[in-house]
Amino acid sequence: MIRSLQHCHRIVVKIGTSSLIHKNGKVNLQTIDRLAYTLAALNNQDYEVVLVSSGAIGVGLDKMHLTERPAAIAEQQAIAAVGQGELLRLYIQRFSDYDTQVGQMLLTHDTFDYPVSRQHVLDTLETLLQRSIVPIINENDTVAVDEMDHRTTFGDNDQLSALVASRIDADLLLVLSDIDGLYDADPHKFQNARKLEAVTHLGQDILQAAGGSSTRFGTGGMVTKLKAAQTMMQAGKAMVLCSGADPRVILRVLAGEDVGTWFGKNTATLNA
Ligand SMILES: Nc1ncnc2c1ncn2[C@@H]1O[C@H](COP(=O)(O)OP(=O)(O)O)[C@@H](O)[C@H]1O
Ligand SMILES: N[C@@H](CCC(=O)OP(=O)(O)O)C(=O)O
């Protein structure tokens, strides 16, 4: 499998809650630090980098010394309101260690449904990128409930990141998760599940392999990651799903190593 990354210049990185929060509920400072280091290093190499980060609720739970995520939406929104500020504080602190500025953008899916608000968001993003400032995006949890009410819907940052990536014409969406790629079945349930190196077509067999989240804080599971992949592939772009355990893996992906699962064209086939 040959991955097409030669012209990769603008990238969107999405990191999920399970990569940012330890199993004991504490914030994973090492991951945040390595993520800031990696994105700052890429920024210095003239890549245009956008970060979509979950974690407001996870960080808020830790900050408020809560061990369980409450079921009530308003409770979750209050926790997200506390956690988002703390999450951004951690990012600003770590990115500034690498002399890189960040700008927070809290969005909702319907921002993109209205031409005027969509244009404002796109203009802000372009201006931040022109100034080499890394936009850090999360869903505006106190306004939107798509992500939280996961008993009824599977909207989330996976799809928001794909929406942003396709709208700003990013070359690559990198999804960092608690799993190192797409398997032919949920590996937390099926021990003999096999990892797929590349997906060039999202057929029924692939879609049926996707299950929900197995972690305490994650919401989307593989279903929303495949929807994100679909958005990117339909836009003629690529997505890589890999482990967020060490975000420096992004550098290996951009170097063309076969890590994670690649969703996109197979350039070997195209050139054959
Ligand atoms: N076919 C599959 N391949 C890989 N992971 C799967 C699959 N189906 C379901 N999953 C589950 O999806 C989880 C990742 O999604 P999620 O918990 O939402 O992570 P994140 O917080 O990183 O977004 C995995 O840990 C795994 O249990
Ligand atoms: N906007 C929410 C995201 C919720 C969530 O868990 O998302 P994810 O970990 O990407 O499946 C937050 O910041 O807590």
Image (tube, rainbow, N blue to C red):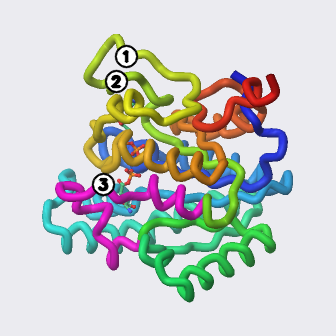
Residue 82 shown left or right of residue 34 in the figure: left
Q: Amino acid at mark 1?
A: Ala
Check whether the beta carbons of the residues at disc 2 and disc 1 lie within 8 A of each other: yes
The residue singled out by tag 2 in the image is 185
The correct choice, above or below, for 23 with respect to 232 in the image is above
Q: Amino acid at mark 2?
A: Ala
Ligand 2 picture quarter: bottom left
Q: Which mark is residue 193?
A: 1
Q: Give the distance between the C-alpha atoms of the residues marked 1 and 3, in whole angstroms.
A: 24 Å
Is 147 within the magenta?
yes
Comparing 272 with 76, the one in front is 272
Q: Amino acid at mark 3?
A: Phe
Q: Is residue 63 visible?
A: no
Mark 1 CB lies closer than 8 A to ligand 1: yes
The residue at the far left in this view is: 71
Residue 37 shown left or right of residue 61 in the figure: right
Comes first in the chain, label 1 or label 3: 3
Quarter of the image containing the N terminus?
A: top right
Picture quarter containing residue 265?
A: top right
Mark 2 CB lies closer than 8 A to ligand 1: yes
Is 84 within the magenta?
no
Q: What x and y, as percent, mark residue 82?
A: 35, 71
Q: Give the distance between the C-alpha atoms of the residues marked 2 and 3, in whole angstroms.
A: 19 Å
The residue singled out by tag 3 in the image is 154
- First to last magenta residue range: 140-165
Picture residue at 30% right of the left edge, 65% below the top: 146
Q: What x and y, as percent, mark residue 171?
A: 71, 51
Q: What x and y, as percent, mark residue 21?
A: 39, 46
Which element is circle 1 on? Answer: loop
Mark 1 neighbour class, 10 Å CA radius: few under 14, some 14 to 19, many 20 or more: some
